[in-house]
Every structure is written in C-alpha cells, then in structure tokens.
C-alpha cells in the first residue's frame, strides 16, 4: 500500500485532482456516443517461460489519454500491455502481453472505433522460437534470434475508414523534430505526437512530459511545453476535435 512515493492507494497530487475535476466539467458530454480505442504500456516478448524482452514504458501517457477521452463522455477501450498503474475506472480494459496479442485486440476493436490513439510502446521484434523450458546458463555466450513483429499502427493506417481519426506516437532519443517528421511521412496519422525519451528529462515513468505535435494542415509542429501528462492528454483531445 501507499508508503512513500508510489503504491496502491497513494493519494493523487492535488494539482492532478484539481485538473481532473476541471477537465470533467469543461468537457462534459462533448464526445458522448463516440468510441475511442487507446493502446498503452509496453509489450513483452518471451525468451523462455521466465524471461522476456520488452520496451521501457510506464503506461502513464496512454492511461492519461484514456482518462481524457472518458472525461469527454466517450466509450473508451484500453488495450494495455503490463503496467504497474491502475487503469482509469470506467474504461473497458483489454489486457495483452505480446505485440501479436495487441495487434489482434486492436484489429478486433478497430471497426467500431471513431478515434484510435496508439500510445503503446510496441516491441518491434520478438524472439524467434522462444524456449518452452527455462534456458539453463552455460559459460559461453547466448544469442537470440529476433524476428519482426507486426506494425500495428501501419496496419491500421492501411485499413482505416476516412471518418476514423488516428493518433500515432514517436519516442525518440535524438533529433526529435527531424526523426518525428520523418516518421510522420512514413505513418501519416491525423496527429503524430512526439516526445523525447531517455536522459534526465525524458518522459519515462514521469508524471510530466513535453511534446511536439504534428497535425494535418500545420506546417510546423505545435510545441506543448513541459506539463502534467493529464493536461497534455487533454490538449491532444482538443487537437483531435480540431
Ligand atoms: N507501433 C505499432 N506497432 C509496432 C511498433 C510501433 O503500432 N510494431 C506504433 C506505436 O504505438 C507508435 C508508433 O507506432 O504509435 C511508433 O512508430 P514506429 O515508427 O514504429 O516507432 P519506432 O518503433 O520507435 O520506430 P523506429 O525504430 O523507426 O524509431
């Protein structure tokens, strides 16, 4: 239970509580009847029954986005990889573990969704032929052969109807603007939300973030200065609304 900085039942920051109340009343019912699909968290790819490879991701940004959609009255499905935080109450949670599991769950929910927000940190590779039993250590080196996972966002962009809006994410350690702009060309979503990861001020596990948002019709990306992830999530929802 809550003792110190983290734990179940830890009281939320007052600024966070105040913001959620404000957001709820400001946006009440705006998205009533809309269906929003959000992916969040990392995926895990098994090496053997007790080991896996994964991506760094707390799930906080994705969960904040799900909460922001919920505050507008939308029906929210949250397809989430394993995280240590509780999903917002009121969302339909679809827990998944692997990229292939997330792919399947997302494709199932896609036809009914009006808005798709892909905040998950999906592993681009999985282990080819994971071992069915625990791999025993030996003195030599151990090599793993990796194979590509499906690109879920790429697949959605190919299948989506024009009425469906899609938000993609880019997590970059270097040259954020250039790498994200390049990613947006490859994955032309309605919005591409880019953030810096790694280093002291990186987004990982923090309650705050700083974003660059590429949007159709904008020549330059919008800079969203360092703020609570919940406030940033609300700004992204405003941009989806147009
Ligand atoms: N994504 C996905 N399926 C994957 C990998 C990523 O759906 N297998 C989604 C993420 O949820 C995110 C976006 O695609 O919305 C990130 O784009 P991508 O080009 O795949 O990012 P990276 O894997 O970081 O690409 P790169 O290795 O080129 O930096």
Image: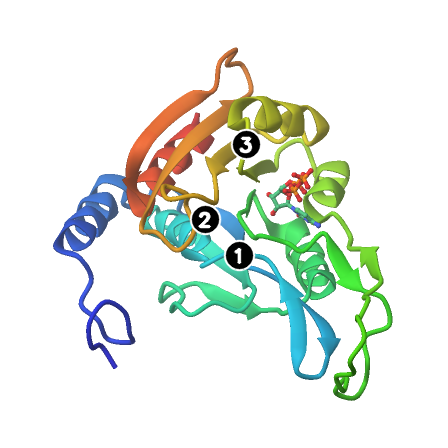
Q: Nearer the viewer, residue 119 or 117?
A: 119
Q: Is residue 227 above or below residue 49?
A: above
Q: Quadrant of the N terminus?
A: bottom left
Crowd tier of the residue under label 2, counting other residues whose Cα lies within 10 Å: few below 14, some 14–19, many 20 or above = few
Residue pointed to by mark 1: 56
Name the spot of residue 48 as percent of width and height, x first: 74, 80
Which numbered marker is on residue 73? none
Pick whichever of labels 1 and 3 is earlier in the sequence: 1
**Disc 3 to disc 2, C-alpha distance:** 40 Å
Q: Nearer the viewer, mark 1 or mark 3?
A: 3
Which numbered marker is on residue 33? 2
Residue pointed to by mark 3: 174
Name the spot of residue 114 as percent of width and height, x first: 56, 43
Pick whichever of labels 2 and 1 is earlier in the sequence: 2
Q: Nearer the viewer, mark 2 or mark 1?
A: 1
Q: Nearer the viewer, residue 13 or 77?
A: 13
Residue at left offset 85%, top offset 66%? 128
């Amino acid at each position: 239970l809550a003792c110190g900085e983290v734990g179940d039942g830890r009281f939320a920051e007052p600024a966070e509580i105040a913001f959620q109340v404000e957001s709820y009343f400001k946006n009440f019912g705006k998205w009533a009847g809309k269906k929003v699909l959000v992916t969040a968290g990392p995926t895990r790819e098994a090496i053997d029954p007790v080991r896996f490879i994964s991506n760094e991701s707390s799930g906080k940004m994705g969960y904040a986005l799900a909460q922001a959609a919920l505050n507008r009255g939308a029906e929210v499905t949250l397809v989430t990889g394993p995280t240590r935080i509780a999903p917002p109450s009121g969302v339909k949670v679809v827990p998944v573990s692997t990229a292939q599991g997330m792919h399947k769950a997302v494709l199932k929910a896609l036809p009914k969704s009006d808005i798709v927000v892909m905040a998950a940190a999906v592993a681009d590779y999985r282990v080819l032929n994971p071992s069915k039993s625990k791999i025993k250590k030996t003195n030599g080196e151990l090599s793993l052969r990796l194979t590509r996972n499906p690109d879920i966002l790429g697949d959605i962009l190919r299948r989506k109807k024009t009425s469906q809006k899609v938000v993609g994410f880019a997590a970059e350690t270097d040259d954020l603007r250039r790498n994200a702009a390049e990613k947006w060309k490859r994955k032309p979503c309605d919005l591409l939300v880019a953030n810096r990861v790694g280093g002291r001020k990186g987004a990982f596990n923090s309650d705050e973030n700083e974003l660059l948002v590429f949007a159709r019709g904008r020549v330059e990306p919008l800079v969203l200065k360092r703020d609570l992830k919940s406030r940033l999530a609300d700004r992204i929802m405003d941009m989806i609304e147009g």
